[in-house]
Image (cartoon, rainbow, N blue to C red):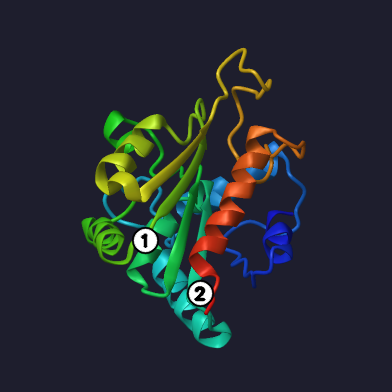
Amino acid sequence: GFATRVAEAGFTVWMPSLFGAPGAPYSAGNIGRQIAGACVSREFSILARHEASPVTTALRSLARQLHGEVGGPGVGAIGMCLTGNFALTMLLEPAVLAPVLSQPSLPFALSPSHAAALHASPEAVDCAKRRARGEGLRVLGLRFTHALMCPRARFDTLRRELGDAFEAIEIDSSPGNAHGIPITSHAVLTKDLVDHHGHPTMVALARVLAFLDEQLRPASN
């Protein structure tokens, strides 16, 4: 459903299938099996603090290939949950111009250092900082404030490393919040999106689409 919204906004969309069964119904069992599969996959390094999962190499290659096929200023990369941090590492590919980190959940927050880590190499972080200074590149991040898999410490690290180049959308999911958002909410743009005008998740969705538009539309003459 999210990909359809992006396509309807005028973008060409690809959805690489990295784990799980596309089209499978949402359930705790299916989610558990997908996470378990990622945990044992050689393409995912779920506890790595200062390096990315190996699959990001293939994703950078895909971005480069698709940019060559479609053209335009560049490519957006939207990661969610287990893939949320991948968009940061994908900035090593120059064609990637619009990185979105939605509830980035790796590495699993098993310790304070894991909770604050970015699942990206120092090289990737330095690349993001260099591109922010030289190209005006920006990074967009989204999370619910009480999401256990995407702790505040991770966004604090992104703020410290990227400064004003990091734009954070943090949606209040504390007990008694004004919009009745459950404390268990996690997936900003998909499962926990509430399709009501003015709801914080819809505001976040609108910002993601605007961010893609700002970064990826050809400049008008």
Q: In the image shown, does 41 or 109 lie closer to the viewer?
A: 109
How busy is the neighbourhood of tag 2: few (under 14 within 10 Å), some, or many (20 plus)? few
Dots 2, 1 in contact, CB < 8 A = no
Task: State left or right for residue 140 relative to residue 35.
Answer: left
Q: Dividing the picture into quarters, in which one does residue 188 lie?
A: top right
Number of numbered discs visible in the structure rendering: 2
Q: Position of residue 39 (x, y in %)?
A: 47, 49
Residue bearing the label numbered 2? 219
Q: Dividing the picture into quarters, in which one does residue 111 lie?
A: top left
How busy is the neighbourhood of tag 1: few (under 14 within 10 Å), some, or many (20 plus)? some
Q: What type is the residue that disc 2 sits on? A: Ala
Tag in front: 2 or 1: 2
Q: Secondary structure at mark 1?
A: loop
| Image height of 92 relative to 121, above or below | below
| Image height of 221 relative to 217, above or below | below
Quadrant where the N terminus is found in the figure: bottom right
Residue bearing the label numbered 1? 137
Q: Residue at x 39, y 56 (%)?
A: 138
Q: Position of residue 100 (x, y in %)?
A: 49, 54
Q: Secondary structure at mark 2?
A: loop
